[in-house]
Image (spheres, grey):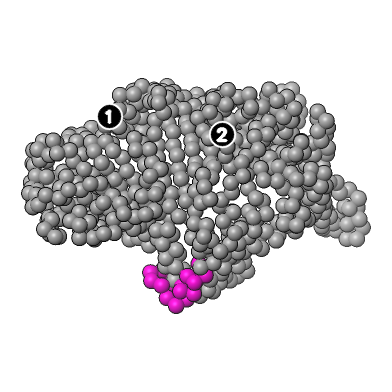
Amino acid sequence: MKKLLGIFLVAVVLAGAAYYGYQELQKISISSLESITPDDVVYYLYSFDLGGKVKDFQSSELFKQVYTTSFYLNLIEPELSKIRKRVPFLPDFFQKDTAFVMYSLGKAAGYTKPGEVQLGDFLFLFRIDPNKQASIKKSVSDFYLSLAAKDQVSFEKHKGIRVTNYRLPKMNISVHYAVVSDVVMISNSIGLIQKSIDLAKNQAQASLSVNASFRKAKARIDKDALFWLYMSNRNYYKQVLPAYMVGASSSGKSPDSQSLVYFSKLKSIMDWVNILEDSVFYVQHDELKSGLFFKAYQVFNKPLSSDENAFKFLYFNQAVDKDTFLLIPRNAIGYFGGTQDMVSLWKGFQKFYGAMDEIAEAGIQAKGGFLGSRGAMPPVKISDLFQRLESALGVSIEKEVLPLAGNNLSVVLADIEEIEIPIPAKPGKASAQTALPQAQGFPMMLPRFYFTLELKDSVKMRQVMDKIISHVTANINQSIRQKEMLMKAAQQVQQGAQDAEGAQAQAQEAAVDYVITSTEAYSNTLITSVDIKDFPLVGLKFNYCIIGKYAVFSYSPALTKKVIDAYLKKGNSLMSNFEFESMQSRLPSSYSSIMFFDFKKLLDEVKETMLFRQLYLTLPEKTKAKNSFSQETVDSMLNILGNIGVFVSTTRSIDDVTVETSGYIKIKGL
């Protein structure tokens, strides 16, 4: 991170220095930064008056809290002071258009030299306020003269525009910049600088501003947004897929004939790539600056999809059944619910892992085949893992489970439970009250999750679940019995007590079930649980129930009862959560997925746990060293995090190929 920050600072300072020696050769009008941006982008990040937005945030109550923390004062402020002292004119650079563009994703780990920065080609553009040009020239003149004297600096011209090159030997990269009209261009690629100059001088047409996909995406942006991001999924995968090919080559440096065979297998996943087109995302304040809105749009390419299941795997437009809210306790911390065509989801997933198996196999062949030896096992295919899963469950997922599943499913974080994990005392050490060794324990915070699934046939689903549980428990018990029989028989034969056959018979008679099932009726609802003998955490056991048209799965029977109460006593459900209801009013009324998360409640529950209090008390009261952690540091961080409230987001289809994600998060003090 420090290296990237160093590159950025050098580039910005050099760009400012350009104003000192800059003489405009001709008047060039640049209408927008997109008009001088080559269109083969991966990411395009834009903000207007970035400096003003930062200054606005620095005047907020939230920033004042941040500014007074020991973390900020000891670690961040000293570094910012150095930057302000060296480049006091820096804020003047960001009072108008600013864009950061990525064209490649950089080298993958393992393909870089020691000390080399793993950074793809980028282009940094910002427009200078004409009224600030004179003051910037004066501010950077001394610095420019000292910098220009170094041998790392060189100059060249492209189409009459001066380009300055600065070499960073320690990072093995170069930074290039130029100034055209009122726009500064910075890049680690001289080619991108040259392309931008060509676009500025109208000697090229392939700019982002005339790209049809970009223009369509930009039309959805709130023009007053704090910032927005455009992503070309096509260009992203053009970067990713060749990287797989290079990685599969036997040398690891260049593709060979074997890796080309490997690359051909990637075509099996191209249907997925072709489905995803461009996406755009932006963030904006709400009207009272009490929170942040965001919106994202993902465009799909349905006509090019040759597999309908692959398309449905990523895109489904049926609305969430809001009855699912009745299955969520009012004080739940978080919830995600969505709809999906389960059959298409399964078939799409099969296509995906089938493609990944082909790629993995081709990759092994490209590297000369599996080189395992000395009993090493070859890699296991994903398809084989699912066959093993079905064998372990004793059912066919596709034929027996999926036909019973509806479209609505959800996962819920109900609360944070603190449990004590027992640690047996060392043998021979007894307490004053008893002659037996006493168990000791330490607290652990356990997030309590559960899952819900809509059902088409509740009666048949219970039969299938009973079949699965019976099959799994029988196999586990049989496996344990066999191991016990062999161990006891071996021990008794070794001791000469009796022959092996008699020992095995005795062990068989003494064998007990280590895993058993039980069924409990609660509010006219049956809860089936799986118990493990001598399991130290008594309250944790897999269980499920079917209530109404939904199945509920959890690892806490107490939590399942809480869900049943929420469903039967509707006043206890999320439907009566004020924060949830008020936040929903800011978002679309119909959606195919929804997420709710209460950060404040999570923070409050964590602070109340014994484990947190114990860790807190081990810290010194005050910060004693620059990088030390203290109770004071924790308190200040908790106060800042306490400003974050509830987050809600929804996803919906707005036409046949476009999905919109809307979200809102409450933040005090903005």
Residue 537 is situated, as x and y percent measured from the top left of the image, at: 71, 35
Residue 485 is situated, as x and y percent measured from the top left of the image, at: 84, 55
Q: Is residue 314 above or below residue 529?
A: below
Residue at point 50%, 30% (across, down): 586
Give the position of the N terminus as an image quadrant: top left
Is residue 186 in view? Answer: yes
Q: Residue furthest front?
A: 655
Q: Amino acid at mark 1?
A: Lys
Which residue is more in the foreground, 199 or 86? 199
Region of the chain picked out in magenta, as a range: 250-266
Give the residue number, with chain letter if any, for mark 1. Answer: 55
Q: Is residue 10 above or below residue 199?
A: above
Residue at point 54%, 25% (across, down): 582
Residue at point 58%, 37% (across, down): 590
Residue 158 is situated, as x and y percent measured from the top left of the image, at: 15, 60
Q: Secondary structure at mark 1?
A: helix
Q: Is residue 142 above or below residue 211?
A: above
Q: Is residue 315 left or right of residue 297?
A: right
Q: Is residue 638 left or right of residue 575?
A: left
Q: Is residue 252 a member of the stretch shown in magenta?
A: yes
Residue at point 49%, 38% (across, down): 662
Q: Is residue 377 left or right of residue 461?
A: left
Q: Is residue 98 a member of the stretch shown in magenta?
A: no
Residue 553 is situated, as x and y percent measured from the top left of the image, at: 71, 40
Give the residue number, with chain letter if any, for mark 2. Answer: 589
